[in-house]
Amino acid sequence: MPADLLYEIGVEEIPANAVLPALAQLEAAIGEGLDRLRLEHGHIATYGTPRRLAIIINDVDDCQEDVVEQIKGPPAQAAFDAEGNPTQAAVGFASSRGVELSDLEVRTINEGEWVFARVSKPGQPAAEVLPQLLKQATEQLSFPKTMWWAEVGFRFARPLRWLVALLGDELLNLEIAGVRAEKSTRGHRVLGSNSVEIEQADQYLAVLEANGVIADHQRRREIIVQQATELAAAKGCRPRIDADILTEVNFLVEYPACVMGSFDSEYLQLPEEVIVTVLQGHQKAFAVEDERGNLAPNFIAVTNADPVAADTVCSGWEKVIVPRLDDAQFYYEQDMRQPLAERREALKHVTFMEKLGTLYDQSERLAELTSWLAEHLDEVSDADAQTARRAAQLAKCDQVTMMVRDGKLGEVLQGIIGGYYARDSGESQAVATAISEQYLPAQTGDPVPDTCAGRMLSLADKMDHLAACFRLGEIPRSSADPYALRRRAAGVIEIVRQTGYQFALLGFIRQSLELLPVPPDDSSLVPTSQAASRLQDLFAERLQAVWEQGGVDYDICRAVLATDWDDIAEVNARAQLLAQLRDSQPELFTALATAAERPARIARPEDIPEAAEVDTSLFEHPMESRLLEEFAGVRDEVETLLQDKSPDWAQVATLLAGLLPVIHQYFEDVMVMVEDEALRRNRLTLLRDIDRLFLHLADFLEIVQNSAQEG
């Protein structure tokens, strides 16, 4: 009868950020393994705490399905003689497969006859095949950082302490790295027993909860939110629950108990971001706000201790948080003694990157890059340009303040605190805001800057950093990107996607590279032209990743990126248009691809000279004149549309697709590859011109068309 499968890996505390990825890997590996082993099963659920990774699979069959395999043997002419009698080859094949000679079959495959054996393989009991699957799934788990046990050849995030492997009430024969599976797990370190028996797999959650462990991380998360909300509501407030902090604290505890602490209200004079950073970044606690959204002098912490000891635990939290707030207040007061602009000189003594100058040099480059953007963007007013340039000059001044030089605070507050210091130093609010927005978006999901000056400064900062790293040869590898360059390129793309800013990407890249200082010995630097090409490739890679995450098919991504593109907004518009057409107007999409494909396939391999033009005096067939006439009309309309800074790509697509009937008829009536060289080259030149027209939209040779689409 089917039974539930329970597998629990007990460990020392796993880093919080490693639990969910490990559970996902475990679910995928075991789920796929069960299918491979021919074991039917029901729902799969995973559970995780700092000390355990667990999976429960309902209704796993107690035995594999029987299977019949058709095994190919020797050729029929080798297996049987002229009279049809079996040869030694047939006898040996039948014997090796455990079947009778009479059970052999002859089949025709690829115009040849072969002998086949029909072999029945009875299924094995699940209890016999599952241990190896669980062992393999465990050994294949990957973590950001691992420990290595050389004596047993085992690598894992933390030491294994126990294993539970049950199929219903049956203990599976499993051993990993010297740890043998048992029927006992361990409860909470304080609230539970160190040895807890589990008689049946379906008792797992209840037995653990009775011993102080809520193994279901989804339920644990809900409990944390509920407790935090109730604690804050008792004071007429509400918690600010940051999703990342919530996930982290959820995997730091096994039995959550929220406590509310407080601090002196005088600290509320600090910038709000400073207080929140101290609470969240340092202590993984939630800030609390009043009904108007203003910070309250309270915090909510999530503990893994006995709820009875809540007051003691809360007092300990306060003893840590208050000194950190004291530090932040001291930094703020000391930093404010000097206007932000006066710190520019100090930037001359801080290295930006080896061989590439100082932070002062970088601030000068940022000012030049914002000016370049102001000249090349239609949406920028003179006031925005001036604001962006001033913000660029001051953007890195907070790097020499006490607040930012405190590593934990500075990692979060750089730029943000600079905006506060700029405003309080007498700079305009527009300049202060742009400084505070310079790093947005820092990662996926972050907002882009709200202001035009902030967006220009962010674009300049990201491109300057990219250019510097690529000049130094610090190019992202498949498994390593220590300078977060992919994320910076994605940030540039996201700003452009949300604003529609149009500018020459290669021009922006080259300007950024040319502004970098040239050291006396630059032999170790990547040549500017090579760095520019590689950086452009990175943007193409990131664009494809962004599009595919948004549901754009890979072949459409490749089709638009295979064209001569140099404007992120423009190429993005083309990719989105083609994706929309494929989904909502498949007939139009297929007509486009079909019309473009045949001229391209014939003309491109012939490499027609750039200067070659169609000679109408060489036309011999009426379809040549008709094709040229209709093509020329569409070309003129398309080129008119392309003169618009934001072309109507849907109309371009409709016009190009309209050429399909005449292109189809042309190939029906006209032989292109004739022996007469002049005639052949003239016809190929016309097809080359048609191919060029379609390339304004995409390279349709990259499009994968199935038979349904083609029909």
Image (spheres, rainbow, N blue to C red):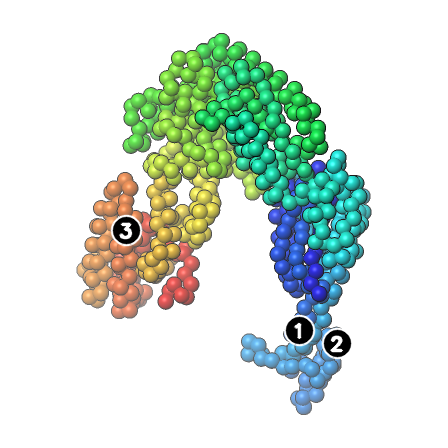
Q: Earlier in the sequence, mark 3 or mark 2?
A: 2
CB under 8 Å between discs 1 and 2: no
Residue marked by disc 1: 68
Q: Earlier in the sequence, mark 1 or mark 2?
A: 1
Disc 2 is placed on an element classified as loop
**Amino acid at the residue labelled 3:** Val
Q: CA distance from mark 1 to mark 2?
A: 13 Å
The picture places residue 572, in percent across and down from the top left corner, at: 37, 44
Q: Earlier in the sequence, mark 3 or mark 1?
A: 1
Residue name at image x 43 percent, y 16 percent: 422
Residue marked by disc 2: 98
Q: CA distance from mark 3 to mark 1?
A: 56 Å
Residue name at image x 34 percent, y 38 percent: 500
Specify few, some or many for label 3: CA neighbours under 10 Å numbering under 14, 14-19, or 20 or more. many
Residue marked by disc 3: 652
* Nearest to the observer: residue 261 or residue 532: 261
Disc 3 is placed on an element classified as helix
The picture places residue 365, in percent across and down from the top left corner, at: 42, 23
Extreme residue toward the top, this view: 337
- Residue 402 visible here: no
Residue 123, picture quadrant: bottom right
